[in-house]
Amino acid sequence: MIYRLAFSISQRYLVSMRNRYLSKAVDPSQNIADLGSGNNPFRHARVCVDKFDSDDIQRGGRILAKPIQKEMKDVDLNSYPYPFKDKEMDFVLCSHVLEHLDDPVQACAEMSRMARAGYIELPAFSSDIFMRPNDSIHQWLCLYDKSKETIFFLNRKFFKEDAGPCHLPIWTRFFLSLKVTRILWKGRICGEYLSSESWK
């Protein structure tokens, strides 16, 4: 009960902040796709992309509701290529998705192929490493290097193997979940994997 309340509040807050952040960066008349739109799609997205038939534990166990008056594409985001032509979209949004995927580097390449620009939102590394040290919901820890315009992905298993159980209070987890990394990109967004050796 408390977990679902905290999850709902954090989702509402993050969606509100995301919309406010993007209101200055996105032209609502553009052809916009939301990858992993879930039950909170971007309000200006014309196309919503997700697996709509699943009860998704990664979104608090909520069944993903189909929004009204939007084109729906029922797609497994772990399957490539995505069903879009090269540069078919003006803008692609991908919020709190890459850290869950099997191959986020390929997902970055697909976004660069299908869109001219985009927005990516990720859990902040500094928070996520403490919030989920030994669970399997987030597969990747994500670091963004603005100078290289590259997202670096570090497999969480390197930390799960070393970290003991972490039992943070629900409200500590709540506040950690509000710290995010926001990335606006044009032309292309790069992704690379970090090995455990390079990290150490």
Image: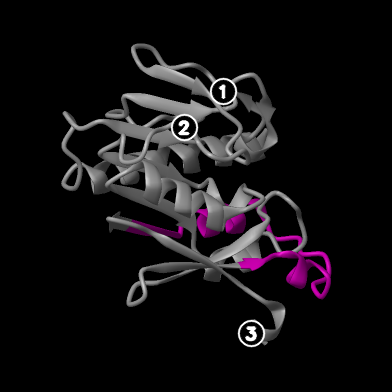
Q: Quadrant of residue 181?
A: bottom left
Separation of marks 3 and 1 at Cα, in angstroms: 38 Å
Q: Nearer the viewer, residue 124 or 196?
A: 196
Q: Are marks 1 and 2 in contact (CB under 8 Å)?
A: yes
Q: Secondary structure at mark 1?
A: loop
Per the image, the residue denoted by label 2 is 37
Residue 177's x, y, as percent? 53, 54
90 within the magenta span: no
Q: Is residue 2 above or below residue 173?
A: above
Q: Secondary structure at mark 3?
A: helix
Say which mark, if any, is on residue 198.
Answer: 3
Say which mark, if any, is on residue 64.
Answer: 1
Q: Quadrant of residue 92?
A: top left
The residue that appears at 48% across and 22% down in the rendered structure is: 73
- Report whether 70 appears left or right of 125: left
Separation of marks 1 and 2 at Cα, in angstroms: 9 Å
- Range shown magenta: 154-183
Residue 126's x, y, as percent? 54, 71
Q: Residues within 10 Å of mark 3 (few under 14, many from 20)?
A: few
Amino acid identity at mark 1 = Leu
Q: Are marks 2 and 3 in contact (CB under 8 Å)?
A: no
The residue that appears at 44% across and 30% down in the rendered structure is: 40
Q: Earlier in the sequence, mark 2 or mark 3?
A: 2
The residue that appears at 75% across and 52% down in the rendered structure is: 136
Q: Check the picture and name the quadrant holding the C terminus.
A: bottom right
Single out the mark in the foreground, 3 or 1.
3
Residue 125's x, y, as percent? 54, 68
The colour scheme of the drawn protein is one colour
Amino acid identity at mark 3 = Ser
Q: Nearer the viewer, residue 55 or 94?
A: 94
